[in-house]
Image (spheres, rainbow, N blue to C red):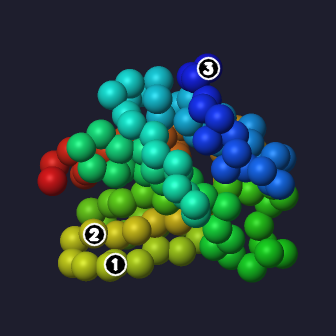
Amino acid sequence: MTHITLDERLFFDGKQAAFPLYEAVAGALLSRYPGTRVRVGKTQITFSERYVYACVSLRPVRRKAELPVPFLTVTLGLPGPLVSPRVAQQTEPYPGRWTVHIPIGSPGDVDGELLTWVEAAHDFARSK
């Protein structure tokens, strides 16, 4: 497992049940992309190399009754929309750039499908 900083742990203060989800996401991303920088903000944790390719947050992107407990929202920047029932929300903030929000509810949700989407977001960010 990757080194988790105190800031990353503090981000989950009061929402500790979601921390194992974060560990799964961070571990997968940092093992695949070891040059990744992690930045902890007030509302999200970003993963970037030159540009951001993924974020995680505790932002509910569905009605509370439709979200797993606990949950974590993975946000990706992609060149097009993503067609999947796993996608909770997506917008096109400007032409050719889609922001896609995917809630996860267990470490097992960090699976091949999600990591394929992360790879697409990573490649998209590197192409800028």
Q: Amino acid at mark 1?
A: Glu
For label 3, count other residues whose C-alpha is less than 10 Å away and answer few (under 14), some (14-19) or many (20+): few
Of the numbered discs in the image, which one, if any, rests on residue 55?
A: none
Q: Residue at 49% x, 59% y: name it.
A: 75
| Residue pointed to by mark 3 | 1
Q: Nearer the viewer, residue 71 or 81?
A: 71
Q: Which residue is mark 2?
A: 97
**Disc 1 on helix, strand or loop?**
strand
Q: Report the amino acid beneath label 2.
A: Arg
The earlier-in-sequence mark between 1 and 2 is 1
Is the Cβ of the residue at disc 1 closer than 8 Å to that at disc 2?
Answer: yes
Which is nearer the eye, 19 or 73? 19
Which class describes the residues within 10 Å of circle 2: few (<14), some (14-19), or many (20+)? some
Residue 124: percent from left, percent from top: 25, 51
Residue at the image position 64 percent from the left and 68 percent from the top? 59
Mark 2 element type: strand
Q: Relative to residue 15, is residue 54 drawn left or right?
A: left
Residue 34, picture quadrant: top left
Residue 50 x %, y %? 24, 43
Seen in the image, is 119 located left or right of residue 15? left
Q: Give the residue pinned by disc 1.
A: 92
Among numbered discs 3 and 1, the one appearing first in the sequence: 3
For the residue pair 99 and 3, the one nearer the viewer reads as 3
Q: How far apart are the alpha carbons under marks 3 and 1?
A: 34 Å
